[in-house]
Image (tube, rainbow, N blue to C red):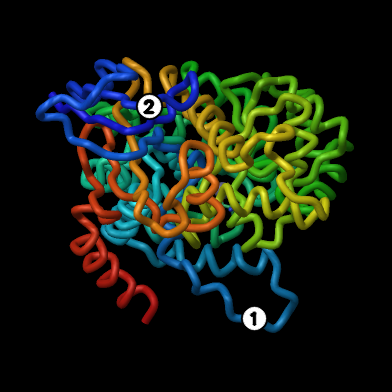
Amino acid sequence: MTRLHFASALLPSGWANDVQVVIAAGAIAAVTAGVAPAAGDERHAIALPGLASLHSHAFQRGMAGLAELRGDSTDTFWTWRETMYRFALAMTPDDVASVATLLYVEMLEQGFTRVGEFHYLHHDRDGSPYADPAEMAARIAEAVEASGIALTLLPSFYAHGSFGGAAPHEGQRRFICSVDQFAALMTASRKVIAHLPGANIGIAPHSLRAVTPDELAAIVPLAEGGPVHIHAAEQVKEVEDCLAWSGQRPVQWLLEHAPLDRRWCLIHATHMTNEEVTAFARTGAVAGLCPITEASLGDGIFSAREFVDAGGIFGVGTDSNVLIGAADELRQLEYGQRLKHRQRNVLSGGAGRSTGRALFDGALGGGARALAQTAGGLVQGARADIVTLDTAHPSLAGRAHDAVIDGWIFAAGGAAIDCVWAGGRKVVEGGRHGLRQAARERFNASMRRLVA
Ligand code: NGQ
Ligand code: ZN
């Protein structure tokens, strides 16, 4: 049993002062506000619940910063994707474990305590399945276990190179499954995560480019009630190709043909009409926004103001993992809106409201929904995923409550994070994960081989 005491903590009901949190068996056993610290309480100034990175392709952390060299043609999402495929083709299971371990260590250091791993690097380098279809998922699980982050594993079904069931490209060979192979992969993946504390599983039809309507209908039941994530409408060309194939735009197609509800998460949904924005918001499905990756890849800017005004639920993900930071994703989300609308505090939700707090609350709730967490936040019964901030950081000094969140998101960034508990285990102290050094060394060894 661990007892923590916070001068202030963000609870589901709002900020509370003098909060004692009792942790037992990895979960929050009790939260009591308005109590003086007791002997034996570990004392901290400010506590927040950990956030989810609801969308990650772990292996891509290995190529962070390696796709910033301009090519011969105009560089776009599609040319980046070719570079990414080449990188994916080179990685061994051991590389995936070392890259994912460092990634999850970094996520924890930055305030992410759960990851939605949208996992599609399934097969061996020549495209043939491993003896164990969940070989690669097991490497993700290994990294999860070492780092302490909570996992929502989203095995991805990927079968085609474009809309209408087009044959996949050679560069996609490690991702490709038949429906039967995918069913076997799901069974094996469930075994892989069974022993991981706090882990759960859903499915991820990759995109309407990679999955036909019949396949989508066949695989959704394999989620067995778990979350369903799909990439949608990230690029203009994708919208155009979808229109050419079906006469409908990707989000419009999903609204009409897929049973969108709170179990679903549409990743990106960058390009939507106003009608799509409103109808999507009404379904209760989550918009899985990845603001840094969307900026990095030149995707465009999500209609966040209109979506939130229509009651839409969003969460954030680190996606390509080019840069890891909860504060950074939330800041980029708001800054995209500022640049688009030429206003400030666009997503604050009203006069006198803190933008940082609105972004934080949005991502906390949306992340929990998208990753099927019933109890989110600092509440009895929830997994003990807690982040403390360093009030000695110059951008936090002298501030309280929402102003601290604004200082973290808009000024200090990850440097303001002090300690992180994941499933009740204190994994980060003084901003550093206990495994940081070892994880870096192992990652660097993989990189020296892969990048050479
Ligand atoms: C992915 N990434 O699955 O890693 C994709 C690229 C694709 C983003 N969409 C592959 N950001 O969409 O075809
Ligand atoms: Zn993605």
Q: In the drawing, does residue 297 fall left or right of residue 372?
A: right
Distance, label 2 to label 1, CA atoms, is 52 Å
Give yes or no for contact between labels 2 and 1 (Cβ–Cβ under 8 Å).
no
Residue 82 lies in what quarter of the image? bottom right
Residue highlighted by disc 2: 17
**Residue at horizontal 31%, vertical 76%?**
449
- Label at residue 70: 1
- The answer to whether any part of residue 233 appears in the image is no
Front-most of residues 8 and 378: 8
Where residue 287 appears, as percent x and y from the top left, is: 64, 35
Dot 2 crowding, Cα within 10 Å, few <14, some 14–19, many 20+: many
Instruction: Of the two numbered discs 2 and 1 on the same chain, state the one appearing first in sequence.
Output: 2
Taking depth in this image into account, of 306 and 146 the one nearest to the observer is 306
The location of residue 219, given as percent across then percent down, is 55, 26
Percent x, y of residue 304: 73, 40
Total numbered badges shown on the rendered structure: 2
Of badges 2 and 1, the one in the foreground is 2
Quarter occupied by the N terminus: top left
**Helix or strand or loop: what does disc 1 sit on?**
loop
Residue visible at 81% across and 27% down in the picture: 278
Q: Residues within 10 Å of mark 1 (few under 14, many from 20)?
A: few
* Depicted 42 relative to depicted 106: above or below: above
Vertical comparison of 87 with 410: above or below: below
What number is the disc on residue 313? none
Q: Kindly tell me whether residue 331 is visible in this rendering.
A: yes
Mark 2 element type: strand
> Which three-letter amino acid code belongs to the residue tagged 2?
Asn
